[in-house]
Amino acid sequence: MRINDNFEKMPASYLFSTVAAKLRKFREENPGIDVIRMDIGDVTLPIPPAAVSAMHRAVDDMADKSSFHGYGPEQGYDFLRNAVAENDYQARGADITANEIFISDGAKSDLGNLGDIYSRDSIIAVADPGYPVYVDSNVIDGRGGEYKDGKWSRFVYIRGNEANGFKPVPPAAHSDVIFLCSPANPTGTVYTRPELEAWVDYALANEALLIFDSAYCAYITDPALPHSIYEIEGARKCAIEVRSFSKTAGFTGLRCGYTVVPEDLFGTDETGRDVSLHKLWLRRQTTKFNGASYIIQRGAEALYSPEGKSQVRENVDYYLSNARMIRDTMKKAGFTVFGGENSPYVWVKSPDGESSWDLFDKLLREVNISCTPGVGFGDAGEGYIRLTGFNSKENTSEAMRRIIGFFNKK
Ligand SMILES: *Cc1c(COP(=O)(O)O)cnc(C)c1O
């Protein structure tokens, strides 16, 4: 048999393995020094107690013949779909029904799997720097073309830079499928309402599909910023939204998320006839997915109880206050900074035009903190690093004390 050759076209990803190798080497050579991890890309607080109790009860359900659950609906249980539609959409004025919610085992799988419902020929637009899953999953499906000088020939790259505040704007070029992330990983930036309106206009004008990743929407505290693409008029006709309980409620290890596919969303087939994307995604999920775990869905449902909501808020606020501390300290130390508000991520520019890896090495050597080099998220990330609010408050304070000590005496 022949393999899928697209795997061989992809460059290996060295970002996290190189960070780990450099850290290991530094620790071996400097055994007395404690390095603070400011590069953590995972939550660190435990699951909110409301979800833990609900999951304990759900385990007991499984132990009793009268309440045992076998295969569930592929789209998710109604108890969770209703809670999502009411709390995350209708309560915010977004017109989304429970039938349009598809519960999944997380956002990453859905972001990759959505490629099953659009054409292999689609032109993909992705942010640079951006979350690598959008690029790699479309390359695996054969939409990349050739890889030359760090770019895929068939992709439209929408660049973030200092001028646009790392919020890429609609390109002049046509694209068929656009991946947007807000609040963004890795830059921590959040689109405003007028900025999202411009994207919806672009998608409608190009008859394109917008795939909106709002995995970090719980971090938005500014009431003027949209949490969902469906707060923008016209989005029901052009957008799919992907969300996750991972970064919101610490479900990174439990696995649960959801995707919203509105019933007014259509693509065209080879004869030019309109076809419902909702129907295609339902067919895709019922064919290749057997539903998220009953126990985990009960845990996710409990996040919408009054206690659940306040426990989630408390955890998110904890990370947000770390991110804010990082943002404020880096600014005080003279760095140009993006994000760190309404997001756990802080995107920091090298002060003297050094490369991402040179700044990584310098921070490791001089102040003993680790970060993620921005160039690992795309060429446009060169000269930047990503810091995160996911460490403890104590460690974050200590890291910031070191930064101030070093950069202020320079
Ligand atoms: C973490 C993350 C996800 C994936 O979340 P899971 O639900 O855990 O798969 C999706 N998008 C972005 C931008 C992320 O950072």
Image (tube, rainbow, N blue to C red):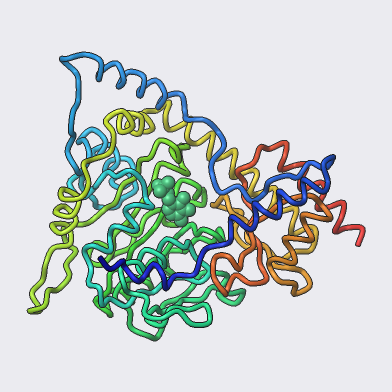
Does residue 216 show up? Answer: no
Give residue 264's quadrant in the image.
bottom left
Residue at x-position 24% and y-position 51%: 96
Residue 200 image point, x, y percent: 33, 70
**Quarter holding the N terminus?**
bottom left
| Residue at the spot 33% in from the left edge and 83% down from the top edge | 174
Judge by depth and name the residue closer to the eye, 104 or 154: 154
The residue shown at (47%, 37%) is 250
* Residue 85 screen position, x and y as percent: 26, 43
Q: Give the residue at the far bottom of this rendering.
A: 172
Corner quadrant of residue 84 = top left
Give the farthest residue toward the right. Answer: 409
Q: Position of residue 282 (x, y in %)?
A: 16, 52
Q: Quadrant of the C terminus?
A: bottom right
Indicate left or right for 320 with 351 as reference: left
Q: Is residue 292 left or right of residue 357?
A: left
